[in-house]
Image (spheres, rainbow, N blue to C red):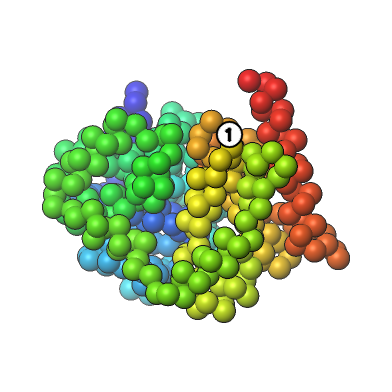
């Protein structure tokens, strides 16, 4: 049985469905849940999206039917809604959906995971997890097609946006012919690529350029220039009137460097330092992140590094880059 068959059988067995995604969701999770919810309504299901927090204003253009609720708002407006299936998209654990939503899911309601992240210790025969997919949005698009629901522009735009974001505009190695075939069908609904791109990335103010300039000024490499990194400080985000969402793509600027194998961006969050990793796909940054207590894809991964008492940000970066060099060397030896 394929994951498409698993999906269809579980949908057909349910009537009242809630969809959620991970806490602090990106456009892949948000776009996937919105499109899936609208499609399932077309399929005759009573369906809502419920997230830990309300949808940020920057994403609301993808939700014209207002299908996404914050947890507290949903409970107050739909106190009697009892789902018989909960779908979690873009993650494969309840622990990442947020405290309130995780408690609401509990153990009594069946859960279906739709995801493309690496997964360990889960029975994949009852879920829809495909680590070869370019984005969760791609999986959702293929599932909507399998149900026989026609793409409308409203359904297509969130999926198209999800794929743009999670492939960094189609630059990652997981992008396949199937990805582009699906995108062609989505575009046939009337999606305008420049409009869609600007909708998610936003037209920028000059202070965004100044922040990027500040971050690029911190760029550095190791001795052989195989690893490059940059540092993002909270005070810079505040100074240039930006938020974390505006900075996610900054790391991709490092991938144009000569000899680059691994790109890293460190974000100083005080007690912890968030580390994002990227590669062109030849080197598995998911393995590197795993060695540092995190995880992710071969081309995109992340981890959190706890700062020791008295340890400076520069010391954290220095020891972490040394560890990245060690893991990268071991990967090259194995290959």
The answer, for residue 77, to whether it is visible in the render is yes
Q: Residue at (42%, 75%) from the top-left corner?
A: 206
Please tell me in which quadrant of the rendered image residue 58 appears. bottom left
Choose top left, top right, bottom left or bottom right for residue 12. top left
Task: Give the x, y percent position of residue 214.
Answer: 58, 68
Coordinates of residue 9 in the picture (x, y in percent): 29, 34
Residue 200 percent across, percent down from the top left: 34, 61
Q: Quadrant of the C terminus?
A: top right
Seen from the viewer's position, the closer of residues 201 and 15 is 201
Any part of residue 275 in sight = no
**Residue at image location 30% in from the left, 57% down from the top:** 197
Q: Where is mark 1, residue-wise? A: 284
Residue at 66%, 53% (x, y): give it: 220
Position of 179 with respect to 282 (left or right) is: left
**Residue 22's x, y, as percent?**
48, 55
Residue at the spot 54% in from the left edge and 36% down from the top edge: 298
Element under disc 1: loop
Q: Say few, some or many: other residues with alpha carbon within 10 Å of mark 1 (under 14 / 14 to 19 / 20 or more).
A: many
Which quadrant is the N terminus positioned in?
Answer: top left
Q: Nearer the viewer, residue 218 or 262?
A: 218
């Amino acid at each position: 049985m394929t994951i498409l068959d698993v999906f269809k059988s579980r949908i057909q067995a349910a009537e009242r469905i809630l969809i959620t995604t991970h806490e602090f969701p990106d456009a892949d999770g948000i776009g996937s849940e919105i499109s899936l919810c609208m499609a399932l309504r077309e399929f005759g299901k009573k369906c809502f999206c419920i997230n830990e927090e309300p949808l940020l204003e920057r994403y609301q253009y993808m939700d014209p039917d207002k299908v996404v609720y914050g947890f507290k708002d949903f409970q107050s407006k739909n106190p009697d809604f009892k789902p018989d299936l909960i779908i979690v998209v873009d993650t494969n654990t309840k622990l990442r959906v947020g405290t309130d939503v995780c408690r609401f899911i509990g153990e009594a309601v069946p859960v279906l995971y739709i995801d493309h992240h690496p997964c360990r210790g889960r029975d994949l025969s009852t879920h829809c997890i495909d680590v070869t997919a370019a984005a969760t949005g791609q999986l959702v698009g293929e599932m909507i097609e399998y149900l026989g629901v026609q793409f409308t522009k409203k359904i297509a735009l969130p999926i198209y946006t999800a794929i743009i974001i999670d492939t960094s505009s189609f630059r990652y190695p997981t992008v396949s012919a199937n990805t582009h075939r699906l995108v062609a069908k989505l575009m046939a609904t009337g999606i305008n690529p420049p409009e869609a791109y600007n909708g998610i990335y936003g037209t920028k103010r000059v202070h965004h350029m100044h922040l990027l300039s500040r971050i690029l000024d911190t760029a550095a490499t190791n001795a052989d220039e195989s690893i490059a990194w940059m540092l993002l400080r909270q005070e810079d985000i505040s100074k240039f009137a930006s938020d974390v969402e505006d900075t996610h793509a900054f790391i991709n600027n490092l991938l144009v460097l000569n000899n680059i194998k691994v790109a890293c961006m460190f974000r100083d969050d005080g007690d912890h330092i968030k580390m994002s990793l990227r590669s062109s796909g030849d080197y598995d940054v998911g393995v590197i992140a795993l060695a540092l207590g995190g995880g992710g894809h071969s081309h995109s991964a992340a981890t959190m590094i706890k700062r020791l008492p008295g340890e400076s940000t520069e010391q954290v970066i220095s020891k972490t880059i040394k560890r990245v060099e060690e893991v990268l060397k071991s990967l090259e030896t194995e290959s």
